[in-house]
Image (cartoon, rainbow, N blue to C red):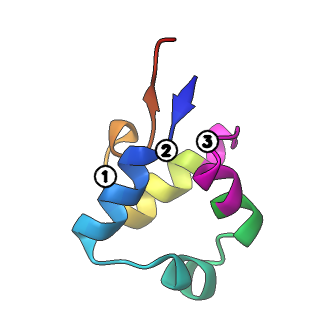
Amino acid sequence: MISFEPFFKTLERKGMSQYQLIHDYHVSTGTLDAMRKNKSVTLNTIVDLCVILDCEIQDIVKIVKS
């Protein structure tokens, strides 16, 4: 299972809001909703978020073993 918990912690650490992602960087609300629900998003989206937040992939997503 994937978890986007690190993403939300990284957002907070970087002082960026979901509102800024939507309005300044054109991240879709559907993408953010999927991430809140730990649903799949494309690797391209994860790369885009890494670039926006100037972070590594592990700052966005982690694998949770069941």
Circles 3 and 2: CB atoms closer than 8 Å: yes
Is residue 19 depicted above or below 53 in this figure? below
Residue type of the residue flagged with mark 3: Asn
Q: Is residue 38 above or below residue 11?
A: above
Name the spot of residue 38 as percent of width and height, x first: 61, 41
> Which residue is drawn at the image coordinates 51% and 11% (left, top)?
66
Against 37, residue 29 (above or below) is below
**Depth order, front residue of 20/47:** 20
Q: Quadrant of residue 57?
A: top left
The residue to which callout 3 is attached is 38
Kindly identify which residue carries mark 2.
4
Find out whether residue 65 is within the magenta segment: no
Amino acid under label 2?
Phe
Residue 18's spot in the image, x, y percent? 51, 76
Sequence-wise first label, 3 or 2: 2
Q: Nearer the viewer, mark 2 or mark 1?
A: 2
Does residue 10 appear in this view? Answer: yes
Residue designated by label 1: 55
Q: The magenta stretch spans which residues?
A: 33-45
Residue 39 lies, with reference to residue 22, above or below; the image says: above
Query: Tag 1 or tag 2, which sits nearer the N-term?
Result: 2
